[in-house]
Image (cartoon, rainbow, N blue to C red):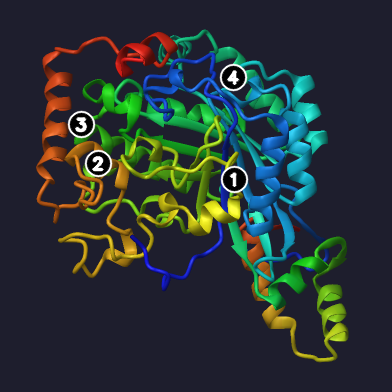
Amino acid sequence: MNINPDLILKFSPMHRLQWEEVQQKDVILYPEGMVELNQSSAEILKMCDGTRNLAQIVDDLEQKFATSGLQNDITAFLEVALKNGWIQN
Amino acid sequence: MAGSKIKITPPRWLLAELTYACPLQCPYCSNPIDYAKYHAELDTEDWKRVLTQARKMGAVQLGFSGGEPLIRKDLPELVKHSRDLGYYSNLITSGYGLSEEKIIQLKEAGLDHIQVSIQASTQELNDHIAGTSSFQHKKDVAHLVKKHGYPMVLCVVIHRENIHQMPQILEMAEELGADYLELANTQYYGWAHANRDLLLPTKEQFEQAEQVAQAFKEKVAGKMKIYYVVPDFHEDRPKACMNGWGTTFLTIAPDGVALPCHSARDLPGLDCPNIKDFSIEEIWHESKAFNFFRGFEWMKEPCSSCDEKEKDFGGCRCQAYLLTGDMNNTDPVCSKSPNHKVIEEAVASARASALLGTEQPLIFRNSINSKKLSGA
Protein backbone atom coordinates (compact mmCIF):
# COMPACT_ATOMS: atom_id res chain seq x y z
CA MET A 1 0.00 0.00 0.00
CA ASN A 2 1.48 3.34 -1.02
CA ILE A 3 1.81 6.33 1.23
CA ASN A 4 0.42 9.59 -0.13
CA PRO A 5 3.37 11.95 0.49
CA ASP A 6 1.18 15.07 0.60
CA LEU A 7 -1.06 13.90 3.41
CA ILE A 8 -0.32 13.77 7.10
CA LEU A 9 0.01 10.43 8.88
CA LYS A 10 -1.94 9.63 12.00
CA PHE A 11 -1.93 6.66 14.35
CA SER A 12 -5.20 4.69 14.13
CA PRO A 13 -7.81 5.47 16.79
CA MET A 14 -8.77 1.76 16.63
CA HIS A 15 -5.37 0.72 18.00
CA ARG A 16 -3.32 1.74 21.00
CA LEU A 17 0.45 2.30 21.08
CA GLN A 18 1.83 1.87 24.56
CA TRP A 19 5.06 1.32 26.49
CA GLU A 20 5.10 -1.96 28.44
CA GLU A 21 7.33 -1.71 31.47
CA VAL A 22 7.55 -5.48 32.11
CA GLN A 23 8.48 -6.25 28.50
CA GLN A 24 10.66 -3.14 28.18
CA LYS A 25 9.19 -2.40 24.77
CA ASP A 26 6.43 -0.55 22.96
CA VAL A 27 3.47 -2.57 21.79
CA ILE A 28 0.42 -2.05 19.59
CA LEU A 29 -2.80 -3.27 21.17
CA TYR A 30 -6.00 -4.09 19.30
CA PRO A 31 -8.91 -6.52 19.71
CA GLU A 32 -7.56 -10.00 20.42
CA GLY A 33 -4.01 -9.05 19.59
CA MET A 34 -0.73 -7.39 20.43
CA VAL A 35 2.31 -6.56 18.29
CA GLU A 36 5.66 -6.10 19.99
CA LEU A 37 7.74 -3.35 18.41
CA ASN A 38 11.46 -2.85 18.17
CA GLN A 39 12.78 0.58 19.03
CA SER A 40 13.02 1.98 15.51
CA SER A 41 9.49 0.89 14.56
CA ALA A 42 8.17 2.49 17.73
CA GLU A 43 10.03 5.75 17.02
CA ILE A 44 8.52 5.92 13.54
CA LEU A 45 4.98 5.25 14.77
CA LYS A 46 5.26 7.88 17.49
CA MET A 47 5.91 10.44 14.74
CA CYS A 48 2.51 9.61 13.22
CA ASP A 49 0.74 12.04 15.52
CA GLY A 50 -1.37 13.84 12.93
CA THR A 51 1.03 16.78 12.43
CA ARG A 52 3.53 15.41 9.87
CA ASN A 53 3.59 13.96 6.36
CA LEU A 54 6.13 11.38 5.18
CA ALA A 55 8.91 13.85 4.31
CA GLN A 56 8.54 15.62 7.65
CA ILE A 57 8.72 12.33 9.54
CA VAL A 58 11.93 11.38 7.71
CA ASP A 59 13.43 14.83 8.38
CA ASP A 60 12.55 14.80 12.04
CA LEU A 61 13.86 11.28 12.64
CA GLU A 62 17.11 11.93 10.76
CA GLN A 63 17.56 15.03 12.85
CA LYS A 64 16.69 13.27 16.11
CA PHE A 65 19.18 10.46 15.50
CA ALA A 66 21.75 12.66 13.73
CA THR A 67 21.84 10.48 10.65
CA SER A 68 20.70 10.43 7.02
CA GLY A 69 19.44 7.97 4.38
CA LEU A 70 16.46 6.74 6.40
CA GLN A 71 13.90 7.51 3.68
CA ASN A 72 13.62 3.98 2.22
CA ASP A 73 13.45 2.12 5.53
CA ILE A 74 10.88 4.49 6.99
CA THR A 75 8.72 4.39 3.87
CA ALA A 76 8.82 0.59 3.75
CA PHE A 77 7.81 0.30 7.40
CA LEU A 78 5.01 2.87 7.07
CA GLU A 79 3.60 0.99 4.09
CA VAL A 80 3.38 -2.12 6.26
CA ALA A 81 1.83 -0.08 9.07
CA LEU A 82 -0.77 1.34 6.68
CA LYS A 83 -1.61 -2.10 5.32
CA ASN A 84 -2.07 -3.41 8.87
CA GLY A 85 -4.33 -0.49 9.74
CA TRP A 86 -1.97 0.85 12.45
CA ILE A 87 -1.85 4.28 10.80
CA GLN A 88 -4.09 6.40 8.61
CA ASN A 89 -2.99 8.49 5.66
CA MET B 1 5.06 -31.96 37.63
CA ALA B 2 7.22 -29.19 36.35
CA GLY B 3 10.66 -28.81 37.82
CA SER B 4 12.26 -25.56 38.87
CA LYS B 5 14.31 -25.49 35.64
CA ILE B 6 11.36 -24.40 33.53
CA LYS B 7 11.44 -20.73 32.68
CA ILE B 8 8.11 -19.21 33.63
CA THR B 9 6.89 -16.46 31.30
CA PRO B 10 4.58 -13.78 32.73
CA PRO B 11 0.82 -13.74 32.04
CA ARG B 12 -0.24 -11.55 29.10
CA TRP B 13 -4.00 -12.19 28.90
CA LEU B 14 -6.40 -12.00 31.81
CA LEU B 15 -9.95 -13.26 31.48
CA ALA B 16 -12.10 -11.88 34.30
CA GLU B 17 -15.27 -13.93 34.55
CA LEU B 18 -17.24 -11.50 36.67
CA THR B 19 -20.35 -13.64 37.14
CA TYR B 20 -21.94 -16.90 36.01
CA ALA B 21 -25.35 -15.19 35.88
CA CYS B 22 -26.67 -14.72 32.35
CA PRO B 23 -30.06 -13.95 30.79
CA LEU B 24 -29.18 -16.16 27.80
CA GLN B 25 -29.30 -19.96 27.71
CA CYS B 26 -26.94 -20.91 24.85
CA PRO B 27 -26.57 -24.69 24.70
CA TYR B 28 -22.80 -24.45 24.00
CA CYS B 29 -21.98 -22.12 26.91
CA SER B 30 -18.36 -22.34 28.07
CA ASN B 31 -19.29 -22.04 31.74
CA PRO B 32 -19.07 -25.30 33.69
CA ILE B 33 -22.13 -27.58 33.69
CA ASP B 34 -22.31 -27.31 37.49
CA TYR B 35 -22.06 -23.49 37.53
CA ALA B 36 -25.25 -23.22 39.63
CA LYS B 37 -23.23 -24.64 42.56
CA TYR B 38 -21.02 -21.57 42.73
CA HIS B 39 -22.97 -18.76 44.33
CA ALA B 40 -20.14 -16.69 45.76
CA GLU B 41 -18.89 -13.74 43.71
CA LEU B 42 -15.80 -11.66 44.34
CA ASP B 43 -16.45 -8.14 45.55
CA THR B 44 -15.18 -4.98 43.87
CA GLU B 45 -12.07 -4.70 46.05
CA ASP B 46 -11.08 -8.32 45.32
CA TRP B 47 -11.31 -7.67 41.58
CA LYS B 48 -9.32 -4.45 41.84
CA ARG B 49 -6.58 -6.26 43.73
CA VAL B 50 -6.47 -9.06 41.12
CA LEU B 51 -6.30 -6.53 38.27
CA THR B 52 -3.52 -4.58 39.96
CA GLN B 53 -1.43 -7.67 40.75
CA ALA B 54 -1.78 -9.23 37.28
CA ARG B 55 -0.97 -5.95 35.55
CA LYS B 56 2.18 -5.59 37.64
CA MET B 57 3.31 -8.99 36.36
CA GLY B 58 2.75 -7.97 32.73
CA ALA B 59 -0.85 -8.87 31.85
CA VAL B 60 -2.10 -6.34 29.29
CA GLN B 61 -5.02 -7.82 27.33
CA LEU B 62 -8.08 -7.99 29.56
CA GLY B 63 -11.48 -9.55 28.85
CA PHE B 64 -14.48 -8.87 31.07
CA SER B 65 -16.60 -11.93 30.60
CA GLY B 66 -19.16 -14.10 32.38
CA GLY B 67 -22.00 -15.16 32.21
CA GLU B 68 -23.09 -11.69 31.28
CA PRO B 69 -20.61 -9.17 32.76
CA LEU B 70 -23.10 -6.27 32.44
CA ILE B 71 -25.01 -7.78 35.35
CA ARG B 72 -22.21 -6.57 37.65
CA LYS B 73 -23.12 -3.09 38.90
CA ASP B 74 -19.45 -2.27 39.51
CA LEU B 75 -18.43 -2.87 35.87
CA PRO B 76 -17.75 0.83 35.08
CA GLU B 77 -15.64 1.11 38.24
CA LEU B 78 -13.62 -1.98 37.26
CA VAL B 79 -13.20 -0.66 33.71
CA LYS B 80 -11.92 2.66 35.07
CA HIS B 81 -9.46 0.89 37.38
CA SER B 82 -8.22 -1.22 34.45
CA ARG B 83 -7.71 1.80 32.22
CA ASP B 84 -5.75 3.57 34.95
CA LEU B 85 -3.49 0.51 35.17
CA GLY B 86 -2.90 0.48 31.38
CA TYR B 87 -4.89 -2.59 30.39
CA TYR B 88 -6.40 -2.93 26.92
CA SER B 89 -9.88 -3.98 27.94
CA ASN B 90 -12.67 -5.80 26.15
CA LEU B 91 -16.27 -6.31 27.18
CA ILE B 92 -17.43 -9.74 26.04
CA THR B 93 -21.20 -9.42 26.08
CA SER B 94 -24.47 -10.82 24.77
CA GLY B 95 -25.57 -7.18 24.43
CA TYR B 96 -28.47 -7.93 26.72
CA GLY B 97 -29.08 -4.89 28.93
CA LEU B 98 -26.57 -2.73 27.06
CA SER B 99 -28.12 0.72 26.53
CA GLU B 100 -26.62 3.68 24.67
CA GLU B 101 -26.18 5.43 28.00
CA LYS B 102 -24.13 2.48 29.32
CA ILE B 103 -22.04 2.36 26.14
CA ILE B 104 -21.13 6.03 26.64
CA GLN B 105 -20.48 5.54 30.35
CA LEU B 106 -18.10 2.61 29.67
CA LYS B 107 -16.30 4.57 26.97
CA GLU B 108 -15.72 7.41 29.38
CA ALA B 109 -14.45 4.92 31.95
CA GLY B 110 -11.84 3.78 29.39
CA LEU B 111 -13.20 0.59 27.82
CA ASP B 112 -11.30 -0.17 24.60
CA HIS B 113 -13.59 -2.46 22.68
CA ILE B 114 -16.81 -4.44 22.82
CA GLN B 115 -17.41 -7.93 21.53
CA VAL B 116 -21.07 -8.62 20.84
CA SER B 117 -22.29 -12.15 20.27
CA ILE B 118 -25.03 -12.93 17.79
CA GLN B 119 -26.33 -16.49 17.59
CA ALA B 120 -27.58 -16.58 13.98
CA SER B 121 -28.53 -14.39 11.01
CA THR B 122 -32.28 -14.66 11.57
CA GLN B 123 -34.39 -13.61 14.52
CA GLU B 124 -36.10 -16.96 14.78
CA LEU B 125 -32.91 -19.01 15.07
CA ASN B 126 -31.03 -16.41 17.15
CA ASP B 127 -33.80 -16.28 19.73
CA HIS B 128 -34.16 -20.07 19.76
CA ILE B 129 -30.43 -20.67 20.38
CA ALA B 130 -30.13 -17.84 22.91
CA GLY B 131 -33.26 -19.03 24.68
CA THR B 132 -34.19 -15.33 24.90
CA SER B 133 -35.78 -12.83 22.54
CA SER B 134 -32.72 -10.73 21.76
CA PHE B 135 -31.97 -10.53 18.01
CA GLN B 136 -33.09 -6.99 17.21
CA HIS B 137 -31.53 -5.57 20.36
CA LYS B 138 -28.19 -7.20 19.55
CA LYS B 139 -28.21 -5.58 16.11
CA ASP B 140 -29.06 -2.21 17.67
CA VAL B 141 -26.21 -2.65 20.15
CA ALA B 142 -23.78 -3.45 17.32
CA HIS B 143 -24.73 -0.17 15.60
CA LEU B 144 -24.33 1.80 18.83
CA VAL B 145 -20.92 0.28 19.52
CA LYS B 146 -19.78 1.57 16.12
CA LYS B 147 -21.48 4.92 16.57
CA HIS B 148 -19.47 5.58 19.72
CA GLY B 149 -16.13 4.83 18.11
CA TYR B 150 -15.27 1.46 19.55
CA PRO B 151 -13.71 -1.22 17.37
CA MET B 152 -16.65 -3.61 16.96
CA VAL B 153 -16.04 -7.30 17.26
CA LEU B 154 -18.90 -9.54 16.27
CA CYS B 155 -18.75 -13.09 17.57
CA VAL B 156 -20.83 -15.90 16.10
CA VAL B 157 -20.48 -19.40 17.51
CA ILE B 158 -20.86 -21.90 14.67
CA HIS B 159 -22.56 -25.29 15.00
CA ARG B 160 -24.93 -27.53 13.06
CA GLU B 161 -28.01 -25.42 13.74
CA ASN B 162 -26.57 -22.29 12.09
CA ILE B 163 -23.69 -23.41 9.86
CA HIS B 164 -25.97 -23.35 6.79
CA GLN B 165 -26.44 -19.61 7.41
CA MET B 166 -22.75 -18.83 6.86
CA PRO B 167 -23.36 -16.61 3.77
CA GLN B 168 -26.08 -14.65 5.60
CA ILE B 169 -23.96 -14.38 8.76
CA LEU B 170 -21.14 -12.83 6.73
CA GLU B 171 -23.56 -10.44 5.03
CA MET B 172 -24.92 -9.42 8.43
CA ALA B 173 -21.40 -8.73 9.74
CA GLU B 174 -20.73 -6.49 6.75
CA GLU B 175 -24.03 -4.67 7.11
CA LEU B 176 -23.38 -4.07 10.82
CA GLY B 177 -19.93 -2.68 10.00
CA ALA B 178 -17.98 -5.16 12.11
CA ASP B 179 -14.26 -4.38 12.28
CA TYR B 180 -13.55 -7.92 13.43
CA LEU B 181 -15.62 -11.05 12.96
CA GLU B 182 -14.95 -14.05 15.13
CA LEU B 183 -16.31 -17.23 13.56
CA ALA B 184 -15.96 -19.52 16.52
CA ASN B 185 -16.55 -23.14 15.69
CA THR B 186 -18.02 -24.67 18.84
CA GLN B 187 -15.48 -26.23 21.18
CA TYR B 188 -16.98 -29.33 22.74
CA TYR B 189 -16.63 -28.95 26.50
CA GLY B 190 -19.25 -28.65 29.22
CA TRP B 191 -22.62 -27.70 27.75
CA ALA B 192 -21.48 -28.21 24.17
CA HIS B 193 -20.20 -31.67 25.09
CA ALA B 194 -23.63 -32.56 26.51
CA ASN B 195 -25.26 -31.36 23.26
CA ARG B 196 -22.60 -32.61 20.88
CA ASP B 197 -24.76 -34.95 18.78
CA LEU B 198 -27.01 -31.99 17.99
CA LEU B 199 -24.30 -29.37 17.48
CA LEU B 200 -21.37 -31.00 15.70
CA PRO B 201 -21.62 -30.37 11.94
CA THR B 202 -20.62 -32.96 9.37
CA LYS B 203 -17.28 -32.70 7.62
CA GLU B 204 -19.01 -31.67 4.38
CA GLN B 205 -20.81 -28.85 6.18
CA PHE B 206 -17.52 -27.59 7.67
CA GLU B 207 -15.73 -27.67 4.36
CA GLN B 208 -18.50 -25.81 2.59
CA ALA B 209 -18.76 -23.17 5.32
CA GLU B 210 -15.00 -22.71 5.43
CA GLN B 211 -14.89 -22.17 1.68
CA VAL B 212 -17.58 -19.48 1.89
CA ALA B 213 -15.77 -17.80 4.80
CA GLN B 214 -12.43 -17.91 3.00
CA ALA B 215 -13.82 -16.24 -0.14
CA PHE B 216 -15.43 -13.55 2.02
CA LYS B 217 -12.17 -12.98 3.90
CA GLU B 218 -10.46 -12.06 0.65
CA LYS B 219 -13.34 -9.82 -0.39
CA VAL B 220 -13.28 -7.75 2.83
CA ALA B 221 -9.48 -7.74 3.30
CA GLY B 222 -8.39 -4.37 4.69
CA LYS B 223 -11.90 -3.59 5.97
CA MET B 224 -12.78 -6.47 8.24
CA LYS B 225 -10.49 -8.89 10.01
CA ILE B 226 -11.74 -12.43 10.44
CA TYR B 227 -10.71 -14.74 13.26
CA TYR B 228 -11.60 -18.33 12.46
CA VAL B 229 -11.61 -20.66 15.46
CA VAL B 230 -10.75 -24.05 14.02
CA PRO B 231 -13.16 -26.99 14.34
CA ASP B 232 -10.64 -29.38 15.86
CA PHE B 233 -12.80 -32.51 15.59
CA HIS B 234 -12.19 -32.45 11.85
CA GLU B 235 -8.44 -31.83 12.11
CA ASP B 236 -5.71 -34.42 12.53
CA ARG B 237 -3.50 -32.34 14.80
CA PRO B 238 -4.65 -30.74 18.06
CA LYS B 239 -4.82 -27.03 18.79
CA ALA B 240 -1.94 -25.42 20.71
CA CYS B 241 -4.27 -24.98 23.62
CA MET B 242 -3.83 -21.76 25.65
CA ASN B 243 -0.53 -21.21 23.81
CA GLY B 244 0.89 -23.70 26.32
CA TRP B 245 -0.27 -24.26 29.89
CA GLY B 246 0.61 -21.47 32.31
CA THR B 247 2.54 -19.48 29.71
CA THR B 248 0.18 -16.70 28.66
CA PHE B 249 -3.41 -17.01 29.90
CA LEU B 250 -4.93 -16.49 33.32
CA THR B 251 -8.64 -16.90 33.99
CA ILE B 252 -10.28 -15.83 37.23
CA ALA B 253 -13.69 -17.46 37.82
CA PRO B 254 -16.54 -15.54 39.51
CA ASP B 255 -15.78 -17.10 42.92
CA GLY B 256 -12.09 -16.18 42.73
CA VAL B 257 -10.66 -19.51 41.59
CA ALA B 258 -7.65 -18.96 39.33
CA LEU B 259 -7.55 -21.22 36.27
CA PRO B 260 -4.91 -21.88 33.58
CA CYS B 261 -7.82 -22.17 31.13
CA HIS B 262 -11.52 -21.51 31.61
CA SER B 263 -12.41 -25.24 31.60
CA ALA B 264 -9.67 -26.32 34.00
CA ARG B 265 -11.88 -26.43 37.08
CA ASP B 266 -13.29 -29.71 35.73
CA LEU B 267 -9.86 -31.41 35.84
CA PRO B 268 -9.27 -33.66 38.88
CA GLY B 269 -6.61 -33.04 41.51
CA LEU B 270 -5.32 -29.66 40.36
CA ASP B 271 -6.39 -27.87 43.56
CA CYS B 272 -6.90 -24.63 41.66
CA PRO B 273 -6.03 -21.79 44.04
CA ASN B 274 -8.34 -18.93 45.04
CA ILE B 275 -7.26 -15.29 44.84
CA LYS B 276 -8.68 -14.82 48.34
CA ASP B 277 -5.89 -17.04 49.70
CA PHE B 278 -2.94 -16.18 47.45
CA SER B 279 -1.53 -13.32 45.39
CA ILE B 280 -1.48 -13.62 41.59
CA GLU B 281 2.32 -13.79 41.79
CA GLU B 282 2.14 -16.82 44.12
CA ILE B 283 -0.59 -18.45 42.04
CA TRP B 284 1.27 -18.00 38.76
CA HIS B 285 4.69 -19.10 40.00
CA GLU B 286 4.11 -21.51 42.85
CA SER B 287 0.69 -23.15 42.65
CA LYS B 288 0.34 -26.82 41.81
CA ALA B 289 -2.35 -26.06 39.21
CA PHE B 290 -0.31 -23.60 37.14
CA ASN B 291 2.82 -25.76 37.22
CA PHE B 292 1.03 -29.02 36.48
CA PHE B 293 1.42 -29.09 32.69
CA ARG B 294 4.23 -26.58 32.25
CA GLY B 295 7.07 -27.81 30.09
CA PHE B 296 7.16 -31.33 28.59
CA GLU B 297 8.06 -33.59 31.54
CA TRP B 298 4.46 -34.58 32.23
CA MET B 299 3.88 -35.95 28.73
CA LYS B 300 3.19 -39.57 27.88
CA GLU B 301 3.74 -41.26 24.53
CA PRO B 302 3.16 -40.51 21.71
CA CYS B 303 3.67 -36.87 22.82
CA SER B 304 6.91 -37.23 24.78
CA SER B 305 8.95 -38.35 21.76
CA CYS B 306 6.96 -36.35 19.19
CA ASP B 307 8.79 -33.75 17.11
CA GLU B 308 5.66 -31.55 17.09
CA LYS B 309 5.29 -31.28 20.87
CA GLU B 310 6.73 -27.77 20.98
CA LYS B 311 4.18 -26.70 18.40
CA ASP B 312 0.95 -27.97 19.98
CA PHE B 313 2.00 -28.89 23.56
CA GLY B 314 0.07 -32.17 23.26
CA GLY B 315 -3.18 -30.30 22.62
CA CYS B 316 -5.88 -29.67 25.17
CA ARG B 317 -5.75 -31.20 28.66
CA CYS B 318 -9.48 -30.77 29.23
CA GLN B 319 -10.29 -32.56 25.98
CA ALA B 320 -7.91 -35.42 26.85
CA TYR B 321 -9.63 -35.80 30.23
CA LEU B 322 -13.17 -35.46 28.90
CA LEU B 323 -12.75 -37.95 26.06
CA THR B 324 -10.14 -40.43 27.32
CA GLY B 325 -10.51 -40.20 31.09
CA ASP B 326 -6.82 -39.33 31.60
CA MET B 327 -5.75 -35.69 31.44
CA ASN B 328 -2.11 -36.71 30.78
CA ASN B 329 -3.01 -38.40 27.50
CA THR B 330 -2.42 -36.95 24.07
CA ASP B 331 -5.38 -34.87 22.94
CA PRO B 332 -7.40 -37.51 21.02
CA VAL B 333 -7.86 -35.08 18.12
CA CYS B 334 -4.30 -36.03 17.14
CA SER B 335 -4.23 -38.86 14.60
CA LYS B 336 -1.18 -40.25 16.43
CA SER B 337 -3.24 -40.72 19.59
CA PRO B 338 -4.16 -44.35 20.36
CA ASN B 339 -7.54 -42.91 21.42
CA HIS B 340 -8.20 -41.06 18.17
CA LYS B 341 -11.17 -43.33 17.47
CA VAL B 342 -13.24 -41.51 20.11
CA ILE B 343 -13.18 -38.47 17.83
CA GLU B 344 -14.14 -40.54 14.80
CA GLU B 345 -16.97 -42.09 16.81
CA ALA B 346 -18.17 -38.66 17.94
CA VAL B 347 -18.19 -37.38 14.36
CA ALA B 348 -20.01 -40.52 13.16
CA SER B 349 -22.55 -40.35 15.98
CA ALA B 350 -23.36 -36.69 15.28
CA ARG B 351 -23.60 -37.43 11.58
CA ALA B 352 -26.02 -40.31 12.18
CA SER B 353 -28.09 -38.09 14.43
CA ALA B 354 -28.18 -35.42 11.71
CA LEU B 355 -29.09 -37.76 8.88
CA LEU B 356 -31.51 -40.06 10.67
CA GLY B 357 -33.44 -37.32 12.39
CA THR B 358 -33.12 -39.06 15.77
CA GLU B 359 -32.33 -35.78 17.47
CA GLN B 360 -33.19 -35.13 21.06
CA PRO B 361 -34.06 -31.56 22.13
CA LEU B 362 -31.11 -29.28 22.98
CA ILE B 363 -30.27 -28.97 26.66
CA PHE B 364 -30.25 -25.23 27.31
CA ARG B 365 -27.87 -23.66 29.78
CA ASN B 366 -29.86 -22.61 32.82
CA SER B 367 -29.85 -23.21 36.57
CA ILE B 368 -32.47 -25.95 36.44
CA ASN B 369 -30.49 -27.98 33.90
CA SER B 370 -27.25 -27.21 35.71
CA LYS B 371 -28.59 -28.70 38.94
CA LYS B 372 -30.14 -31.65 37.12
CA LEU B 373 -26.97 -32.55 35.19
CA SER B 374 -24.54 -32.08 38.06
CA GLY B 375 -26.69 -33.64 40.76
CA ALA B 376 -26.32 -30.49 42.84
- Taking the image as shown, residue A87 lies to the left or right of residue B318, namely right
Q: Residue at x 50, y 50 (%)?
A: B249
Asked if residue B148 can be seen in this view, the reply is: no
> Could you confirm whether marks 3 and 1 are on the same chain?
yes
Give the residue pinned by disc 2. B321
Looking at the rendered image, the disc whose residue lies closer to the viewer, 3 or 2, is 2
Which type of secondary structure does the marked residue at label 4 adopt? helix
- CA distance separating discs 1 and 2: 40 Å
Picture coordinates of residue A45, whole percent (x, y) = 75, 67
Viewer-nearest of discs 1 and 2: 2
Q: Amino acid at mark 1?
A: Lys
> What's the residue type where badge 3 is placed?
Thr
Q: Are marks 1 and 2 in contact (CB under 8 Å)?
A: no
Task: Please name the residue shown 71% across and 37% down the image.
Answer: B150
Quarter in which the C terminus of chain B is drawn: top left
Disc marking residue B4: none
* Subunit bearing disc 3: B
In percent of width and height, residue B155 lies at: 50, 32
Q: Which residue is mark 4?
A: B138
Residue B223 disc label: 1
Identify the subunit bearing mark 4.
Answer: B
Task: Single out the residue that lies furthest toward the front.
Answer: B277
Q: Are marks 4 and 1 on the same chain?
A: yes
Alpha carbons under labels 3 and 4: distance apart: 29 Å
Secondary structure type for disc 3? loop
Residue position for label 3: B202
Amino acid at circle 2? Tyr
Which mark sits nearer the N-terminus, 3 or 4? 4
Labels 3 and 4 within one chain: yes
Mark 2 neighbour class, 10 Å CA radius: few under 14, some 14 to 19, many 20 or more: some
Distance, label 3 to label 2, CA atoms, is 24 Å
